[in-house]
Amino acid sequence: MKEPFVIRNKSQGVYVHIPFCVKKCDYCDFYSKVGTSWEQKEFERALFQEIDLQRDNLLQLPISSIFFGGGTPSLLPPSFIEKFMEKLQDYGTLLPNREVTVEVNPESGQREYFRSIKRAGVNRVSIGVQSFQDILLERIGRIHNAQKAKESIKIASEEGFTNINVDMMMALPGQRLEDLERDLDILTDQPITHISYYSLILEEGTPLEQRLKTVEGQPYLIPEELDRTFYHKVVSTLEDRGFYQYEISNFSKEGYQSIHNMNYWRLGEYVGLGPGASSNIGACRFKNKASYEMWQKKIRSGKLCVGEEEVLTKLDRQNEWMMLGLRLNEGISPKEFTKIFGEDFFKIYAIPLKKNIEGKTLTWNHGRLVLTEKGRDLANQVEMDFLLCDE
C-alpha cells in the first residue's frame, strides 16, 4: 500500500475552469466546448454546488490566489465573478493580498467588461495574444487580430489594472526570426507587467497537428534548432527590457511574479472547480472528468465528478519537487529539501549531480542548484536524470 506524504502549506489556490469557447483554437487540447446560453447558466448553478461539495477542502487553508481559466472565462458576464467571490467566502478565508486572475481573449476584452470585473475583485488579467502578426494568428486558428490585442491591453491598463499578463507563443507555423523580433518589439511597448512565452506544442489529434502532417503543411514546421534560437532571443530581449525571467517560460517586472503559478511550482495546495479541473489537497491529487455533461450531472446529484485520483508518496513528491523546482530560476535548495523530506540531498542525488555539474547543465548559485543556459535548453533531460524510482 502506498504511504501518503503531506507537505505542510500555509495557504492554497483556487482554480476555476470555464469550459466554454466561441471557437476552439486549432492547437488547443484543453477541454472546452462551444456552449449555449442555457449551458452557461447551468454551469454557474452547478459550480456553486461544487463549492458546497468542496467546502471541507476550502476550509483547510487561507486562499492566496484565485485563477479563472479555460476555455474563455471572459465569455461569462462579470456578475458571475462577483457572485462566485461572494459564494467562496462562505467557506474560504480570502487573504487581503490575494491575487485574482481572469484569462481574457482579446475579442471579448471590452471596456465595460474590464471595469466590471475590477469592481468584482479581480486584480490581475491574463490576455491571450499569442502573436501580433495577423497571418500567424490565422494559421493557428485564433479569432482576434493584432489590433484587437493591442486595444484590449490598452483598455485594461486604462481601467486601472496594473498587473497585466500577456500569453505569447513562438515557433508558430512558418514563423521567421524577424517575425519574432517584431512581436517582441510590439510586446515590450505595451503597459504590461508579466509575460508567459511558450513554444507551440503540436498536440496529437488537434486540427493544427493534423494539418501540419500533410505535404502542404510540412514547409511550415519549425525545426528544433530554430525553436532554440527563438527561445534565446526571447530570453535576452525580455531581460534587456526589464522583464526578469523567474521560470523557464515566465518573465515579470519586479514584484509581479504570478502567485498562483508559484504556488503550483512549489507544490502548494489548490482546489480545482469545473470540468477537467485538478486539485492538489494534502497527499491526494484528483482531477474532475473533462466533460461538461458528466460533470454537471454528477454535481447536481450531490457528488463530486472525479475522474482520476492519486495518493502521493514521499517519492512522488520528491520527484515533483525536483522537476518543478529546476524550472525556476531560483533553483533548488538542498537545505530546504532536507527540511521537507528528512533526507540527505547530496546522498540521494550524488550521481545525477556529478553528471550535470560536469556537463555544465547545472551550477551552484548562492547555495542553490540552478540550470545553466545549456541546462534550460536540455531541461527535460536534466529532470529525467533526477527522477527517482522505487527500488
Image (cartoon, rainbow, N blue to C red):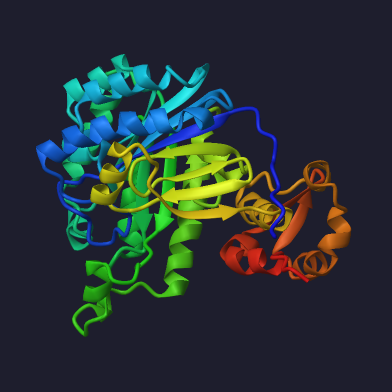
Q: Nearer the viewer, residue 118 or 373?
A: 118
Q: Does residue 238 appear in this view?
A: yes
Query: Residue 73 is drawn in which quadrant?
Result: top left
Q: Nearer the viewer, residue 114 or 52?
A: 52
Q: Residue at x 32, y 50 (%)?
A: 183
**Outermost residue, front direction?**
301
Q: Eyeballing the image, is 7 above or below 51? A: below
Q: How many marks?
A: 0
Q: Position of residue 112 (x, y in %)?
A: 17, 21
On the rendered image, what quadrant is the N terminus found in?
bottom right
Left or right relative to 78: residue 280: right
Q: Nearer the viewer, residue 134 or 284?
A: 284
Q: Residue at x 82, y 41 (%)?
A: 339
**Outermost residue, bottom direction?**
215
Q: Residue at x 20, y 46 (%)?
A: 21
Q: Position of residue 219 (x, y in %)?
A: 26, 79
On the rendered image, what quadrant is the C terminus found in?
bottom right
Q: Position of residue 272 (x, y in %)?
A: 43, 40
Q: Residue at x 29, y 24 (%)?
A: 81
Left or right relative to 223: residue 182: left
Left or right relative to 231: residue 300: left
Q: Position of residue 133 (x, y in %)?
A: 23, 53
Query: Residue 41 is drawn in which quadrant?
Result: top left
Q: Does residue 242 appear in this view?
A: no
Q: Nearer the viewer, residue 291 or 186?
A: 291
**Outermost residue, left direction?**
37
